[in-house]
Amino acid sequence: MKVNKLRKYAVVDLEATGTAIDSSIIQVGIVIIENGQITETFETDVNPHQPLDEHIISLTGITDEQLSVAPEFSQVASRIYELIKDAIFVAHNVKFDANLLTEQLFWEGYELRQPRVDTVELSQVFFPTLEKYSLAQLASALEVRLNQAHTAIADAQATAEIFLMLQEKIRQLPQQTLQVLKTFSHHLLYESHLIIDEILEEKMREDDLDQYELVEHLMLKKSLPLAKEKELARNFTDNLKTLGLDVRPKQEAFAQLIEQGLALPEPSLIQAPTGIGKSLGYLLPLLSQGFKEQLVVAVPTKTLQDQLYYQEAAWLRNCFNLSSQSIKAARNYIKLEYFQKSLETPESNRLLNRYKMRVLVWLAETQTGDLDEIRQQQGMESFFEALRHDGRLDVYSPFYEMDFWRRAQEKAKTSRLLITNHAYLLEESKERQNFITNKVLVIDEAQAMLATLEAQTHQRLNLTQLLSQIKLLLDEITNHLQQRLLESLQFELEQVVNGNESYCQEQLELRLPKLRQDLSELDLVALQPLAKALSEDFPLVWLEKDELNEPDQIILHSSQKELVRLTELIKPKKLYLISSSLQISQEVNLADLLQLESYHFERLPSERTTTQHIYLPRDLPDIRSLSQEQYALFLAEKLVQLVQLDYPILALFTSKKMMLKVSDLLDEVEVNHLCQYKNGQPFGLKKRFDREKNGLLLGTGTFWEGVDFKEQDRLLTIITQLPFENPKDCFSQKIYRELEQKGQNPFMSYTLPMMLLRLIQAFGRSQRRPEQKSAILILDQRLLSRSYSSTILDYLEDNFQLEQGNFIKILPVIAEFLI
């Protein structure tokens, strides 16, 4: 049978009494596609002559009464066979449907032998930027109607529409890309490769090189030039209306403060509450004033950076043709040479080869080359790590002109709006002193800049891994002197890492002079990170045990003694520091900690919210009285009870280790949830959570202040523990010394206010739209039992509706509020 004759497809979906091969079919849906058109549909219930279990009834809506009057499979088998016998069998997760139908038809005397095509794996290859590939989530992402999911004909019709969209997507790809895909298509399961073969045979035209650039064997999307920029109105309200957005009084007041700040030479600090639309509140005024300088915006995380670039900046690109660029560190981008090499390296791993196909498709679409655009990298981290850009550019490389990292840097020089993250801002400013010179700089979520500044003075190194590297080096080195020095270094480090934490720290301090001496005589690239971490530039040195890996890892930290002055690293023409939390306490604000010599401070007053309530259970155990296992069990039990409320839940943890312990316990009792690190990275998890009507998401780190939840109309946020800093942390110690020298109490002036600010930042993640309702449940007994409790409670009562009571009695109160 020739490939170009296979024009008929039977898209099949079955509902059955279970998922095993001996299950009975209870419903059949078939959609026939010929020459790109749906020509026929067929549906029937099937009487299985056995009662359905409650799960199947709940999932499908099919009842025993409905099936009792349906035909038996033997009565419809002939019709089904005649309909699909000469067609390619297509299904979403084809293994189940094809195997079950083939088995049932066989017992009726019919034999199915036609090829099989799976829309799951085709979607994974040809829609590489989607988060998940279940039928419901694909239908949602591709805007395919699926009104009655888990009924056979509705699922078959949705699958057929997705299949047609897949064909069209493949048809739109360049012929050269399809040729390369064809060489890998035998790694697809079943006969899904037939779709590529068929379309490649019908594709006669040459590739459109106005849209693509052919480099080696890769077809790369050319940059799309923007039309001439439309001038923004000088009036903030007019620009909002052009974007089709409503004016909000607080946002307008904030925009006025931004505009007034342009006339001030010193940095402008503006404190404004969350949820007022700060991003457009500073973007529109600063871009509409006609100044020639580039506007640079820095946010704390890459997740927020992506949100800003693909949302607010996209509105400006689409509406005003305003040029904008997002710029990250080199390793976020693909290095085309590395990918080309991977294509030329034969691999037997089917999954790895399918990921190569995904990247090929993505390269024909992406304008950025940012690897974060490709979703579902779990399990293939090492493959993607090998593709990351190293920041080195070879002008003689055939990929030089199309190198995504180079192109991003070039666009960054000329774009009116440049979006980056705090870490890249500081690192690039350190490398290039003119990076920010004569530019307008907005540091959004400015309170997070403190930790990023500290990272500039901080070195981190895994000593356990380094010792493994040293063992390999000893096998390779032939120089006798270097061998002896390396053996000495190995011995010293082994003494440091073997033992309990306090012993390790003692050994480190004892052996530090000898370690430095050995390193000074060893000129090996692999040891440069250790030499830097133990150099005199980083005199504070300490160890930490990472218990999340097996076996435990010993981490070396080193740091400078003093806080870094922000203006030593960045010198823009105009600086804005924007946050909802700039005033840390009556004695301390962010400008003091950033050591700004002069600044102008403005504050928009916050109002007591009626759409966000805080709940404080009184019957919680003292955390100090519980072991780690007992505390994890306590939190898991509470989350199991809270899931019964049937609302989206965001559970925030201060400890990665505790979060993973709780996640494992939830797995044991089969509570469906998403967990950071286990199920993906923040941006991807957020998108998956947004699609769930009543999901549970466990997060830490970025989720406290770097991810906004705008999609949920109702959200329950669980604060598992008050977000105090570790007082033994080196950065905290620096702050304490600074404040003590000024005669201030570090805990009351800094630690407590900073904890409260982090808490308020977390509250703001779920208060992004006026119509949102958000409940906050705090599961930390310290909020009611410590000497400082009244300080926190007074603030919360002034700004929120606060309710206390026993945990079990609070649950219905939360449910009633969220209705």
Image (cartoon, rainbow, N blue to C red):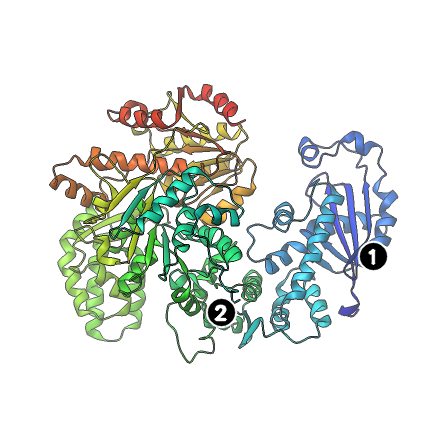
Q: Which residue is mark 2?
A: 339
Is 28 left, or right, of 297 in this rendering? Answer: right
Q: Which residue is mark 1?
A: 85
Relative to 670, is 30 above or below? Answer: below
Q: Nearer the viewer, residue 99 or 570?
A: 570
- Residue 395 visible in image: yes
- The type of residue carrying mark 1 is Lys
Graded by Cα atoms within 10 Å as few (under 14), some (14 to 19) or many (20 or more), the crowding at tag 2 reads many
Which amino acid is tagged 2?
Phe
Q: Residue furthest bottom?
A: 396
Q: Quadrant of residue 567?
A: bottom left
Q: Earlier in the sequence, mark 2 or mark 1?
A: 1
Q: In the image shown, does 433 or 749 lie closer to the viewer?
A: 433
Report helix, strand or loop for mark 2.
Answer: helix
Q: Residue at x 69, y 49 (%)?
A: 96
Identify the residue at horizontal 70%, vertical 56% (top origin): 163
- The answer to whether residue 287 is left or right of residue 129 is left
CA gap, disc 2 and disc 1: 41 Å
Q: Is residue 782 visible?
A: no
Quadrant the N terminus occupies: bottom right
The image quarter in which residue 765 lies = top left
- Check residue 233 in the rendering and tell me which mark sits there, or answer none: none
State the image coordinates of residue 338 (x, y, percent, origin top left): 46, 70
- Residue 339 lies, with reference to residue 504, above or below; the image says below
Question: Where residue 22 appears, x then y in whole percent?
Answer: 73, 43
Specify whether 250 is left or right of 190: left
Please provide percent x and percent y for residue 11. 75, 53
